[in-house]
Image (spheres, grey):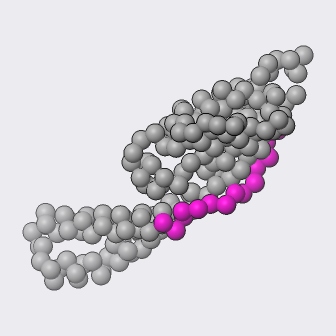
């Protein structure tokens, strides 16, 4: 029996905090970028800096706003339901998260919680990115980022990598 995947939007949390974090970082980076340009140009005065900061508002304010909005929207969550659980190779599913630079932080009662392995990606997501796998007798539920699910869903639906004994139903 082939694996079926049902995807539904899940409640996301932390998008507002991620927006503000990335907006402030991008504002600081654009201000420093303008400061360095004026410093190398030899025209660094408070009057010139403030004049050019206002003149280049599309770069100094609007661009950080766009960066922050797109980053916050990229943290949407999705709940995948993969059935049947008896035909899913759960070790390969765990291995998928390990290859995507996650580490398992909690395992109990058929539920495995992951978090980012490195500090900087974990900090930039404010540790809100914690996918988990929950195994039930009939199906497997995977709660993860939507952008990560766009990589996983085609592999499950079209490939045989996540199936146990994939050649049995092809005969």
Quadrant where the image shows the N terminus: top right
Whole-percent x, y for residue 82 in the image: 78, 39
Is 98 one of the magenta-colored residues? no
Hey, which quadrant is residue 30 in on the image? bottom left
Extreme-left residue of the structure: 42
Whole-percent x, y for residue 142 in the image: 69, 43
Is residue 118 visible from the viewing direction of this image? yes
Identify which residue is drawn at 62% across, 60% down. Answer: 12
The answer to whether 105 appears left or right of 85 in the picture is left
Hey, which quadrant is residue 40 in on the image? bottom left
Whole-percent x, y for residue 11 in the image: 67, 60
Q: Nearer the viewer, residue 125 or 156?
A: 125
- Decide: is 4 above or below 34: above
The answer to whether 143 appears left or right of 26 in the picture is right
The answer to whether 131 appears left or right of 1 in the picture is left
Identify which residue is drawn at 51% across, 36% down. Answer: 103
Q: Nearer the viewer, residue 131 or 136?
A: 136
Q: Which residues are magenta?
A: 4-17
Q: How many marks?
A: 0
Q: Nearer the viewer, residue 1 or 126?
A: 126
- Decide: is 84 above or below 126: above
- Decide: is 107 above or below 12: above
Is 9 one of the magenta-colored residues? yes
Identify which residue is drawn at 59% across, 42% down. Answer: 113
Identify which residue is drawn at 37% across, 68% down. Answer: 24
Is residue 151 visible from the viewing direction of this image? no
Whole-percent x, y for residue 146 in the image: 64, 51
Quadrant where the image shows the C terminus: top right
């Amino acid at each position: 029996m082939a694996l079926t995947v049902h995807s539904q939007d899940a409640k996301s949390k932390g998008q507002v905090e991620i927006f503000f974090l990335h907006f402030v970082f991008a504002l600081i980076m654009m201000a420093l970028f303008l400061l360095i340009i004026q410093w190398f140009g030899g025209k660094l005065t408070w009057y010139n800096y403030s004049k050019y900061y206002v003149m280049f508002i599309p770069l100094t304010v609007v661009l950080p706003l766009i960066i922050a909005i797109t980053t916050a929207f990229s943290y949407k969550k999705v709940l995948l339901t993969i059935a049947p659980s008896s035909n899913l190779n759960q070790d390969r599913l765990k291995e998928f998260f390990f290859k995507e630079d996650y580490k398992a932080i909690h395992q109990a009662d058929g539920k495995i919680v992951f978090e980012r392995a490195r500090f900087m990606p974990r900090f930039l997501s404010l540790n809100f990115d914690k996918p988990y796998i929950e195994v039930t007798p009939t199906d497997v539920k995977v709660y993860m980022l939507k952008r990560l699910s766009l990589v996983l869903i085609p592999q499950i639906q079209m490939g045989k990598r996540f199936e146990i004994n994939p050649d049995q139903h092809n005969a």
